Amino acid sequence: MLAELEPLANTPAAYGFVALLGLLWGSFGNVCIYRLPPTDKHPKGRSVVAPGSHCFACNTPIRWYDNVPLLSYLWLRGQCRSCKAPFSSRYLIVEAVTGLLFGLSWWFMVVAPALWLPFDQRVIHFAIAAAFVFTMVVIAFIDLDHKLILNKVTIPSMIVFYGASLLLGEHRWYDGLVGMLVGYGVPWLIGEIYYRVTKREGLGLGDGMLLAVVGALLGWRGVVVSLFGGSLIGSVLGIPLLVSQRLKSKPGTDGEPSLLKLELPFGPFLAMAAVFYLFAEPWIQLNFRLTGG
């Protein structure tokens, strides 16, 4: 059945379908990002199923035709139809980013490896990649908003992605287990050393849980690339953000420059690097095979 669809894999219709799928999952991702974190009113977070989508200001249920990913935000001009309360542009960004990542996943996992992998295996790789990028988007945006990486997201994800790694022919059964151990252990060790030297928190255990998710699917190499790649991305993007925050803030009360006390979530940078390695890993593996490595 799948083989009959292979001629369509590199057509605009295929990319359109995959992008639409990404937009739909991005819409659900917005629900997860908004409802899962704890709040004063909901210390354990809220259900992502009930109640249905509604305006946060007037609680009016959002009609189905006002809940179309990407388009609804544009035709409603980013506000509630009933009370005109503004919606965050974050909703638009999450949907667009997820749709784009699904499209990239289709190309990297289905179209590009057509010469050396059967179609059904490539589709399985795409499904795993799409689930992984969706998880990274949810974790990254929750961390941006709340500086939290939630165990109720990472622990089930570890189990799911370890199981998924067994469907990838080039992965051995213990790669994911070693990846989880390294992913959690290295940030814990770095954070412990940093705390003992500076008496301030460095890498949080949430970052370790995120890297354990990465390791469950991509093994210890994925953890290493994500950690160092995330550090590089964080340096390029994070330092200007910290400087900008410093210029808007007052000096520390103890005379220490407040720049050193500002916090920037590391999870989004780790997630970016992990997605990069997800797409790059098959090409790295192919290069090793061709060169005899």
Image (cartoon, rainbow, N blue to C red):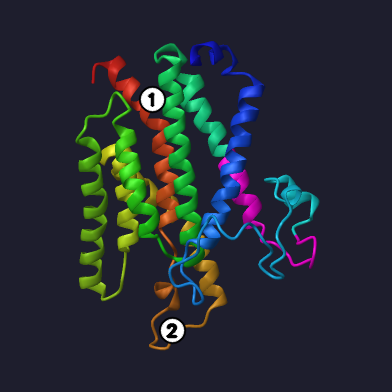
Q: Are marks 1 and 2 in contact (CB under 8 Å)?
A: no
Residue 106 shows up from this direction: yes
In the rendered image, residue 78, in percent from the top left (x then y), is placed at 74, 58
Name the image quarter holding the C terminus. Answer: top left
Relative to 288, is 272 above or below? Answer: below
Q: What element carries label 2?
A: loop
Cα gap from disc 1 to disc 2, whole angstroms: 48 Å
Point out the stretch of residues depicted in magenta.
79-99
Of residue 102 and residue 231, the one placed in the foreground of this image is: 102
Residue 202 lies in quadrant: bottom left
Task: Name above or below for residue 152 compared with residue 281.
Answer: below
Q: Mark 2 sits on what residue?
A: 252
**Residue visible at 21% across and 32% down in the picture:** 173
35 left or right, relative to 213: right
Identify the residue position indicated by label 1 in the image: 283
Q: Does the magenta stretch include residue 98?
A: yes
- Disc 1 crowd rating (10 Å Cα; few below 14, some 14-19, many 20+) is some
The residue positioned 52% from the left and 28% from the top of the image is 106
Q: Is residue 228 left or right of residue 111?
A: left
Residue nearest the viewer, comparing 283 with 68: 68
Q: Residue at x 63, y 35 (%)?
A: 20
Q: Position of residue 23 (x, y in %)?
A: 62, 41
Q: In this view, does 277 lie above or below 156?
A: above
- Please indicate whether residue 79 sits to the left or right of residue 286 in the image: right
* Visible residue check, residue 228: no
Give the image location of residue 214, x and y in percent: 34, 44
| Amino acid type, mark 1 | Trp
**Label located before the other in sequence (1 or 2):** 2
Q: Is mark 1 on a helix, strand or loop?
A: helix
